[in-house]
Amino acid sequence: MGVSEWFLPESERPWTSGNLVVPRIHGAAYFARLVELIEATGADDRVFFTDWRGDADERLTEDGPTVAELLRDAAGRDVEVRALMWRSHPGQLNGEENGHLGRIINECGGEALLDERVKWGGSHHQKLFVVRHQGRPEDDVAFVGGIDLCYSRRDDAEHGGDPQAAPLDDRYGDAPPWHDAMAEIRGPAVAHVLDTFTERWDDATPLDHRNPYRAVAHRIARMPRRPEQLPERWDPPPEAGRHQVQVLRTYPWKRPHYPFAPDGERSIARAYTRAFAKARRMIYVEDQYFWSDVVAGTLAEALRREPDLQVIAVVPRWSENESRFGGPPAHYGQRVAHDLLRDAGGERFSMFDLENAAGTPIYVHAKVCIVDDEWMTIGSDNLNLRSWTHDSELTCAVVDPDGELPRRVRTTLWAEHLGLPEDDPRLADLGDPTALWNERVGAPGSRVRVHEPVRLPARTARWAGPVYRRFYDPDGRPKRLRGTSDF
């Protein structure tokens, strides 16, 4: 089977056929699946993961186990447990929580590293989990998506929120409703997900490179400066389905260079740009931020090119930090993107947000994109310059030769958001999807509301714009590419 025309050329990123991809919508479903799979592991099996934040005491199901209990019990069965977690910047809670979970993993016989080999002001934002089985490669599985092993993520389709909640704007309530997604992958693509973990793990740059704070933090957390060598690599798993998968990444240009990406890597940006250039009918996006004139420009070009193309974006109603100084830069970035797309497509571009049955806004943390029901992604990346160039990110692009998976994922998400049964024929019709969404705003059972980004006073925009560009949405491309639309 030839490479899909939707994918980047194999010279840029490898791809595989013969995979089975199962979307796990909502944190509760993903966590329950993770517990099921890891509890079934035994001696000499392997569990490798990366995380932006991990809370040791986060309950993965209502009755447990916690994250720490699940991993400690696996290590106690002689499962090889390896973890790469973001070190975080001074004063941020992520570093404390990741350090705590890392110490637990190390003390029970696994190995966890706190990794801040990032560009200044950046983060390791990848979320991946790989479970491999000694002698049972057909059972190997990988997960890629937006869900961290931390507070607030264990929500379900009812969106009552996770009782263990991370801080968020007060308008989301004491247990913020949380919408998120992961992709479960079986087949040869598992090896490509594992490559991302392995490349970072084998990076010879010391974890506390040229940074006294990191050095002290690593000593306090009893973390190694360099990792132990990974065990001998196993062959890729056998074919498990018909889905084609291309694993895409972002790494910034930085010094010292990543040995596996000396110029950085922007395959996520190039893959989205390619898919948007092929779009003819519909682009559907669920995104935490939806910022950046550079990123929105790729969508605007598609809207100007295709008079029948419609773009629907689902975003949070409020950002996570709506303080006096925290909110305006986020509003500035989203407003720029919104106005650019409205200028290009008029009413063919629409933004919506969500609320639960009680009227509480749902925090949209999912990173999902579906183009023409033919190409889809689930990953850690958002539609902004930071995710496309500056932080480390990972996403799974999927094409189904049978043409079924992207359509089924979209109609499942739309059925939940619009309050319609999954067999409603209107969900399958891409003739005028924006009309359906507008029709369902405020309808019984519907969760969708029109989202109008905040328009800042000129006085506020004068300081919010530079703060947004410098700190909220920085450009991690090499200098020769900055200021351009090239990736």
Image (cartoon, rainbow, N blue to C red):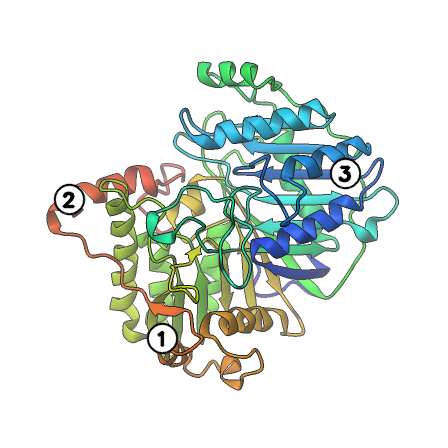
Residue type, mark 1 in image: Val
Q: Earlier in the sequence, mark 2 or mark 1?
A: 1
Classify mark 3: helix, strand or loop. strand
Closest to the camera, between mark 1 and mark 3, is: 1
Between 92 and 251, the one lying in front of the other is: 92
The reply to whether the C-beta atoms of the residues labelled 1 and 3 are less than 8 Å apart is: no
Looking at the image, residue 239 lies above or below residue 325:
below
**Would you name the residue on which mark 2 appears?**
462
Mark 3 surroundings within 10 Å by alpha-carbon count, few (fewer than 14), some (14 through 19), many (20 or more): many
Q: Secondary structure at mark 1?
A: loop
Q: Amino acid at mark 2?
A: Arg
**Marks 2 and 1, how far apart at CA:** 34 Å
Alpha-carbon span between mark 3 and mark 2: 52 Å
Residue at the right extreme, as displayed: 135
Q: Percent from the top left, x then y, of residue 89?
A: 43, 27
CA distance for labels 1 and 3: 47 Å
Can I make out residue 257 in this image? no
Q: Which quarter of the image is occupied by the N terminus?
A: bottom right
Q: Which residue is mark 1?
A: 441
Please state the horizontal and vertical placement of residue 419, each as a whole percent of the image: 47, 75
x then y, percent, for residue 347: 29, 75
Residue under numbered circle 3: 46
- Res 140 visible: yes
N-terminal-most mark, 1 or 3: 3
> Which of 78 and 245 lies nearest the eye of the viewer?
78
Query: Residue 224 is drawn in which quadrant?
Result: top right
Q: What residue appears at the point 11 percent right and 46 percent down from the top-left corner?
A: 459
In the image, 96: left or right of 396?
Answer: left
